[in-house]
């Protein structure tokens, strides 16, 4: 599983394409590992285990919020989007603190401890039992009981001693049915409001755990990549290939965890698993192994990632204390997201913006101010050519934001679609869980990345490799076509309103191909097009745009919200129709935006002044 922060560490397309030029006789320090400094092996396994923990947790998060805490789809998508947005933003701060004070090695160790503790706290948040479902019907509260398990699960309310089955209707009304199937009561649209009674303590653990992972990730993620870069001297042509090896660790770690963590949490087939705590515990164990590998390195990393020579040594504990104190701040941001209520339809764009949570206002405000402000600075202080190159970079940043907004539906709306409207049977032999479907992307990336690298290399030798704008345009069209492929497959849904698993796998295949067209070249593009004296600031804007994309991905997922009772939808046809409608809309929009970028590729190429 790749993501834009991982690609800050590794640009696989460029790296493998350069593999033929690797100088294996370049100095490598003390010993070699597949022709690379032996320290790379330690960093490879450390990163693989860290990604094992993170992606294992992420595979569970959406389902955990919806099924254990019984949050509505709107709240679930908002929390998930806000969490991933901050995960992509905090490395900017962690990288800055490492560069100026701590050094990369201390930062990685502190981040690993913080993340492992965060996963452990998430584990604790699940041990108190799931939230108790209830429904408010025309102003009166009714307790909800859940009968059965798996696909046979049903939800009932008790009214005047009679147990009534809850059935959602296509017109958004809710029917309460007697045992013989007759309708006892029909609740008007909007008058049936399901919810859950949650423990304040365990909700506190949930948000604290997410906050700790967010802060820890900011220290870990950017700085282990910095250490990988420091293994190679300037001009050592093995650097790109080394990052490619490191990148494979990212994908291998995520691939296995997205199978194992859901397996332990919710089981597979007739086995119901050990519980959510087990999935989070495995993620914590993976992160703990990552820390052990780094902490007890046998001296292999001596001399790498040390504190800057001019950095004061007396600031460390102040930084650690400030980081711990940042946890309540992040907690409050998540709490604000959790309590967010979408504005009523017809409130307009201004009304929508005014009701955004604090995090949304900060991100949108910063991004909308930063882009024109930096362009104005470039116009005033740079040459005409520099301004034009900066303009091209900003245009591509905006299009990149659109791509990741749609691509990151994988962890939210697509996971819920897998849980509710996908037949999870694998050739009738066994069934996988909704959380495990996220492994498709990591699998396809591992399988296809070398092939794409060879393809780009072959096209480059013939002078036929497409430019950056064309790759971005193809990627945007690809992510849209993936959704449209799934929409096409929905026509073949069975009487149970479930789509075959392979249609969802096909979407992930198309999305993985699209990712390989855009992900490896983004950061390289920023360094090439930015004015040298503000390239760091442009990197900040790049990561800010990705963070905004993660947040907006949560907003987009909210449009696919489906009414649930006790974590289960009340009408699978309504659920399928809702998802298909949203996926078709964003699929068509993405294809159209991709076409627009392809049309803009020629003028953008002129603005880029030969940068490829």
Image (cartoon, helix red, strand yellow):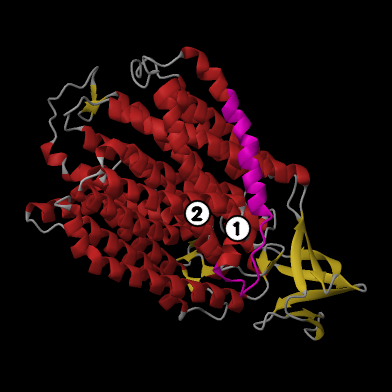
Q: Residue furthest front?
A: 380
Q: Residues within 10 Å of mark 1 (few under 14, many from 20)?
A: some
How far apart marks 2 and 1 lie (CA) works out to 10 Å
Question: On residue 364, which mark appears?
Answer: 2
- The picture quadrant where one finds residue 104 is top left
Against 269, residue 61 (above or below) is: above
Q: Say left or right for 397 vs 172.
A: left
- Tell me, yes or no, whether the highlighted magenta stretch contains residue 96: no
Q: Secondary structure at mark 1?
A: loop
Residue at horizontal 55%, vertical 53%?
360
Q: Residues within 10 Å of mark 2 (few under 14, many from 20)?
A: some
Which portion, as a residue range, is magenta? Answer: 321-349
Against 591, residue 437 (above or below) is: above
- Residue on which disc 1 sits: 356
Q: Say left or right for 77 vs 149.
A: left
Residue 278 in the image: state x and y as whole percent.
Answer: 61, 42
Q: Residue furthest bottom?
A: 182
- Tell me, yes or no, whether the highlighted magenta stretch contains residue 329: yes
Which residue is at the front of the view, 480 or 593? Answer: 593
Residue 595 in the image: state x and y as whole percent.
Answer: 29, 71
Q: Secondary structure at mark 2?
A: helix
Question: On residue 100, which mark appears?
Answer: none
Residue at horizontal 48%, vertical 63%?
429
In contact (CB < 8 Å): disc 2 and disc 1: yes
């Amino acid at each position: 599983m790749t993501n834009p922060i991982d690609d800050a560490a590794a640009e696989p397309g460029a790296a493998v394409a350069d593999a033929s030029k690797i100088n294996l006789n370049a100095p490598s320090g003390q010993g070699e590992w597949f022709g690379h400094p032996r320290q790379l092996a330690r960093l490879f396994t450390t990163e693989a285990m860290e990604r094992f923990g993170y992606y294992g947790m992420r595979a569970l998060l959406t389902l955990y919020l919806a099924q254990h805490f019984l949050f509505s789809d709107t709240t679930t998508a908002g929390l998930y989007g806000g969490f991933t947005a901050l995960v992509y933003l905090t490395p900017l701060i962690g990288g800055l603190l490492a560069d100026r004070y701590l050094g990369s090695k201390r930062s990685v160790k502190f981040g690993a401890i913080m993340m492992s503790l965060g996963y452990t706290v998430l584990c604790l948040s699940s041990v108190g039992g799931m939230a108790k479902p209830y429904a408010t019907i025309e102003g009166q509260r009714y307790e909800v009981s859940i009968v059965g398990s798996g696909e046979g699960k049903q939800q009932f309310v008790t009214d005047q001693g009679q147990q009534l089955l809850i059935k959602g209707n296509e017109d958004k009304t809710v029917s309460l049915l007697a045992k013989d199937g007759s309708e006892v009561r029909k609740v008007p649209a909007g008058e049936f409001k399901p919810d859950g009674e949650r423990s304040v303590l365990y909700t506190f653990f949930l948000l604290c755990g997410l906050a700790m992972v967010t802060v820890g990730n900011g220290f870990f993620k950017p700085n282990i990549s910095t250490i990988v870069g420091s293994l190679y001297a300037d001009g050592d042509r093995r650097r790109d290939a080394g990052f490619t090896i490191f990148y494979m660790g990212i994908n291998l770690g995520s691939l296995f965890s997205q199978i194992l963590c859901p397996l332990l949490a919710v089981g597979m087939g007739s086995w119901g698993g050990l519980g959510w705590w087990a999935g989070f515990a495995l993620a914590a164990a993976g992160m703990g192994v990552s820390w052990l590998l780094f902490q007890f390195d046998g001296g292999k990393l001596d001399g790498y990632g040390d504190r800057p020579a001019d950095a004061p040594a007396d600031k460390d504990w102040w930084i650690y204390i400030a980081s711990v104190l940042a946890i309540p701040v992040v907690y409050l941001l998540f709490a604000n997201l959790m309590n967010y209520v979408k504005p009523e339809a017809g409130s307009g764009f201004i009304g929508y913006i005014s009701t955004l949570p604090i995090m949304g206002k900060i991100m949108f405000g910063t991004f909308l101010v930063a882009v024109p402000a930096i362009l104005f600075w470039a116009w005033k202080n740079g040459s005409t050519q520099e301004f034009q190159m900066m303009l091209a970079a900003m245009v591509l940043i905006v299009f990149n934001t659109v791509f990741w907004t749609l691509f990151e539906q994988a962890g939210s709306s697509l996971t819920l679609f897998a849980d509710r409207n996908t037949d999870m049977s694998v050739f009738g032999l066994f069934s996988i869980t909704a959380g495990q479907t996220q492994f498709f992307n990591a699998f396809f990336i591992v399988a296809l990345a070398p092939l794409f690298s060879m393809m780009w290399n072959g096209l480059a030798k013939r002078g036929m490799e497409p430019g950056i704008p064309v790759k971005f345009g193809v990627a945007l069209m690809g992510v849209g076509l993936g959704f449209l492929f799934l929409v096409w497959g929905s026509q073949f849904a069975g009487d149970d309103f479930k789509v075959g698993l392979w249609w969802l796998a096909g979407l992930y295949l198309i999305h993985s191909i699209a990712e390989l067209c855009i992900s490896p070249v983004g950061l390289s593009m920023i360094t090439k097009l930015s004015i040298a004296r503000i390239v760091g600031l442009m990197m900040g804007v790049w990561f800010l745009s990705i963070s905004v994309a993660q947040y907006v991905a949560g907003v987009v997922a909210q449009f696919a919200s489906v009414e649930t009772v006790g974590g289960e939808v009340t009408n699978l046809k309504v659920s399928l129709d809702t998802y298909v409608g949203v996926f078709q809309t964003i699929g068509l929009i993405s294809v159209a935006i991709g076409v627009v970028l392809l049309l803009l590729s020629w003028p953008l190429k002129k603005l880029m002044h030969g940068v490829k």
